[in-house]
């Protein structure tokens, strides 16, 4: 183990927790679908990694054969199961383990952000975590075609940014290594990048009060 790297990691963790704290809601809180008038509730894991002096975010490309969002770029995550006992963090880690072999031992919890609603009327709970040490991915061939990281700075740059409208929705889109990160995934990457890089949130998070 490298003590200097361990100290740097500990400082990064502390700084991130302080940075996200004003906007973090109660850990694990999970509204019922009927309470928020959504069809389903889900969680995604926004896993961050410190790489050569820059923060990266872990993303997956969904398997092409999947009926919903096949081939699209997304975070590890999925729909709440009964076994999750209504806990948003549990859902995020369970799905991450099923999809890419990532567990809470490999990724330290940082914050649970307020929920957002997708165009499919699914309420999503973003769970932020930081990868700890070395980790060997084991992606599920049934669900994941590719696993990669992208620098958060990408999502604050106009160089690779475009936008488009579809079905009355406005979509952010970023191209990275021929991959199109768009929609809710891109929006959450932008929010996370503002937290981590500019040290302040410049996009309003709706639907939930801080520390609710």
Image: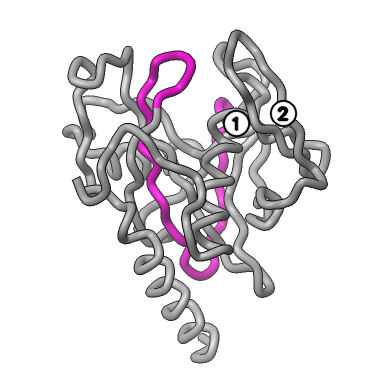
Residue 190: which numbered mark, if any? none
Residue 58 on the magenta segment:
no
Q: Quadrant of residue 193?
A: bottom right
Residue 163: which numbered mark, if any? 2
The vertical placement of 189 against 5, above or below, is above
Q: Residue at x 30, y 27 (%)?
A: 80
Q: Residue at x 46, y 61 (%)?
A: 130
Q: Residue at x 54, y 31 (%)?
A: 184
The vertical placement of 28 against 7, above or below, is above
Asked if one can make out residue 43 in the rendered structure from this viewpoint, the answer is: yes
Q: Residue furthest top?
A: 167
Helix, strand or loop under label 2: strand
Residue 162 locus on image (x, y percent): 76, 33
Q: Residue at x 40, y 15 (%)?
A: 121
- The residue beneath circle 1 is 141
The vertical placement of 122 against 19, above or below, is above
| Rendered-image quadrant of the C terminus | top left
Where does the magenta region start and end?
A: 117-145
- 115 or 176, nearer to the observer: 115
Comes first in the chain, label 2 or label 1: 1
Q: Tell me the CA gap for discs 2 and 1.
A: 31 Å
Residue 88 locus on image (x, y percent): 28, 39
């Amino acid at each position: 183990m490298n003590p200097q790297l361990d100290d740097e990691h500990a400082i990064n963790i502390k700084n991130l927790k302080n940075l996200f704290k004003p906007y973090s809601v109660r850990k694990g809180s999970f509204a019922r679908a009927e309470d928020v008038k959504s069809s389903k509730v889900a969680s995604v894991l926004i896993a961050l990694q410190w790489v050569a002096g820059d923060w990266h975010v872990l993303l997956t490309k969904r398997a092409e054969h999947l009926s919903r969002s096949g081939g699209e770029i997304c975070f590890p995550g999925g729909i709440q199961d009964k076994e999750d006992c209504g806990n948003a963090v549990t859902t995020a880690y369970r799905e991450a383990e099923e999809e890419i072999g990532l567990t809470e031992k490999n990724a330290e919890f940082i914050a649970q952000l307020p929920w957002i609603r997708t165009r499919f009327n699914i309420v999503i709970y973003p769970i932020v975590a930081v990868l700890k040490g070395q980790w060997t991915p084991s992606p599920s061939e049934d669900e994941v075609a590719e696993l990669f990281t992208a620098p958060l700075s990408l999502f604050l740059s106009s160089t690779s940014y475009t936008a488009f409208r579809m079905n009355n929705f406005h979509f952010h889109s970023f191209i990275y290594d021929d991959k199109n990160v768009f929609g809710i995934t891109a929006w959450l990457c932008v929010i996370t990048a503002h937290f981590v890089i500019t040290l302040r949130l410049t996009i309003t998070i709706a639907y939930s009060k801080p520390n609710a």
